[in-house]
Amino acid sequence: MTEKLDMGRRVRLNRDRVLRAGVSLADEGGIDSFSMRRLAQELEVVPMALYKHVSNKEELLDGMVEIIIAGIDPPEIGADWKDAVRLRVLSARHALQQHPWARRAIETRTTKTPAVLAYMDSFIAMFLAGGFSTDLTHHVMHALGGRMWGFTQELFDDPAMPTAAKQAAVPPEAQTVMLRRMAELYPNIATIAASAAHDDGSVVGHGCDDQFEFEFALDLLLDGFERLHRQGWTSRPGQRSNR
């Protein structure tokens, strides 16, 4: 039993309730303002009550990541490796989009928890079940990188390349000057940016790392993995295929 702050009532805490409350709090306010004290206030308990369930903030964040992982669909039973991997990646992307703070939490974890290791293990299993060699699977996992979790680094997310949302707050005259200056300094980036402009109703929408772009790159990777697998590719010097 854990004492509430008013001392007159009691509420039962367990690790799962603490972790889920942490996820909800991070969803509302982000990870920067997140703290054990703030979580204790949310649960209406004294801060020390939390330490019966998590030893510190890092363990709390580890557990919160576990909650997110639990929301990712398991590998599709009976699907071939390519479909299974694609569906799992897109499910991970959907799960992380519901919790914008989760990407940063995953990237900053210094310890691979059992949940994280199990998730990675399940990815390796999908490739091995598809007949991939351990050698190729090793390199495939490196190539997937953060995409395994449903995210990538956004190539053009830079203040110098204002998105439509940012542009809306900038006077049209200033936008014209900014874009002209960009074209002078970085003509090739400006060319690509101009050609990639999308209407409001476009599938791609505003920004280069949305669902369309993500799936485009994911499919390129999966097609490449498939080609190497069919070729019997190996990383051993002198035995690599050039096809």
Image (cartoon, grey):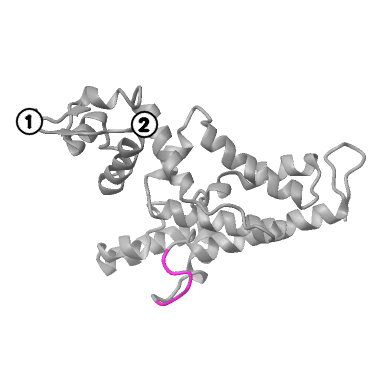
Near-viewer residue (121 or 155): 121
Q: Residue at x 48, y 69 (%)?
A: 204
Residue identified by numbered label 2: 60
Q: Quadrant of residue 101?
A: top left
Q: Is residue 213 left or right of residue 199?
A: right
Looking at the magenta stretch, what is its main secondary structure? loop
Whether residue 217 is visible, yes or no, is yes
Near-viewer residue (58 or 76): 76
Whether residue 157 is visible, yes or no, is no
Residue 221, numbered circle: none
How many marks are shown on the rendered structure?
Answer: 2
Instruction: Say which label, 2 or 1, has the lower sequence index.
Output: 1
Q: Quadrant of residue 44?
A: top left
Residue 8, numbered circle: 1
Neighbour tally class for label 1: few under 14, some 14-19, many 20 plus, Cα within 10 Å: few
Q: Residue at x 64, y 40 (%)?
A: 121
Check residue 21 for magenta coloring.
Answer: no
Contact check, label 2 and label 1, Cβ < 8 Å:
no
The magenta segment = 201-206
On the rendered image, what quadrant is the N terminus found in?
top left
- Is residue 159 depicted above or below 37 in this figure? below
On the rendered image, what quadrant is the C terminus found in?
bottom right
Please state the horizontal and vertical placement of residue 186, each as a whole percent of the image: 50, 56
